[in-house]
Image (cartoon, rainbow, N blue to C red):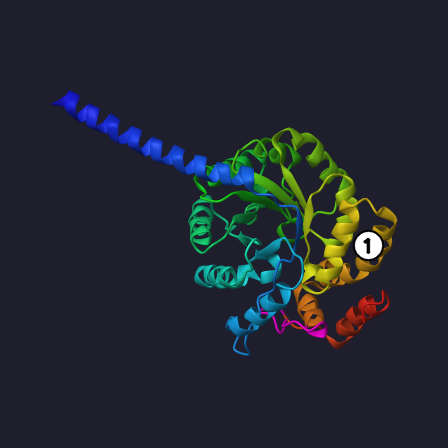
Amino acid sequence: MQCVRAWRSLNSLCRVAHHRAWKRSQSHAAAARLDLSGIYPPIATPFTAKEDVDYQKLEENLQKYAKIPFKGLVVQGSNGEYPYLTVEERVEVVRMVKQSLPAGRLLIAGSGCESTRATIQLTQKMAAAGADAVLVVTPCFYKGKMDSRALIHHFTKLADSSPVPVVLYSVPANTGLELPLDAVVELSQHPNILGVKDSGGDITRIGLIVHKTKAWDFQVLAGSAGFLMAAYCVGAVGGVCALANVLGQELCELERLCVSGRWEEARVLQQRLIEPNAAVTRKLGVPALKQAMEWFGFHGGSCRSPLQPLTEAESQQLRRDFSSNGWL
């Protein structure tokens, strides 16, 4: 009897292991096929006057983005105000975007949470809602304990179970934590970890990541338009840029110039983008991005509380940063 029970137990374990291996192989094959190269706007989330998600205005933004040659969209990233949305709202926004996305464009969904368990659960929901890949920010509430060992464990456990490829996300301005280089290099060897979005702006670091991970076909995305050309120079394949919500056509043109080696033209365009980009990111943040979107014919609107609209002085500074570079 004990032998029979042992055999049944072993048989069950083998079936589970086979199923898990099959799931990983499917996801890993997808990771191998997915080409991230190109420009992605990390889209903003419009809200109504009562701070509900405004799906009608979101749809109208999506129709306009469909006319710009983006590689895809990043949904529920930092500029989507994901920390202020419920899990249900985050998933519903992804589902709605997927329904409107033109064929052939990628949908990368932000699924990062503070715990590994919650991140795995949300990643599975994002995949079910239509995400082609997930963008996963570093956990940061206990940032003093988020060393390489903890982060490698977190992302490896996620990648082992994720039904879609994983893109790492390092954004020290928001998290107070930079994903360590040694962790990036080790994680790049996981077959279901596709690349990294690096928003830190350290070009030597980006170049080093490209250099140290090239054996594993690891893809690096610049996390800001302010250093997009420089990132291309050291081997990045594209960018997830807040400014693309406003000047999407121009960011795609900068990508085209860099990829075709027209560096002098690229330099001129890049210089005109530096001040507007700084204004809608590190200087004035999401409220500035949303205001600029309104100026350029998109729905930005108000942020969800506690984020506040720009002061009059901040709004004037934002306008100067765009107009002095010929955009307004």
The dominant secondary structure in magenta is: loop
Based on the picture, tell me whether residue 217 belongs to the magenta stretch.
no
Is residue 82 shown above or below 116? below
Residue behind mark 1 = 270
Please tell me which residue is depicted at 69% across the width and 72% down the height of the picture: 291
> Residue 34, located in which quarter of the rendered image?
top right
Type of amino acid under label 1: Gln
The residue lying furthest to the front in this view is 103
The magenta segment is 294-307
Is residue 158 shown above or below 254? above
Is residue 179 shown above or below 173? above
Please tell me which residue is depicted at 87% across the width and 55% down the height of the picture: 268
Asked whether, in this view, residue 147 is left or right of residue 5, the answer is: right
Expressed as whole percent of the image width and height from the top left, the position of residue 251 reads 74, 57
The residue lying furthest to the left in this view is 1
For this rendering, which residue is in front, 234 or 250? 250
> Residue 313, located in which quarter of the rendered image?
bottom right
Expressed as whole percent of the image width and height from the top left, the position of residue 303 reads 60, 70
Expressed as whole percent of the image width and height from the top left, the position of residue 109 reads 53, 53
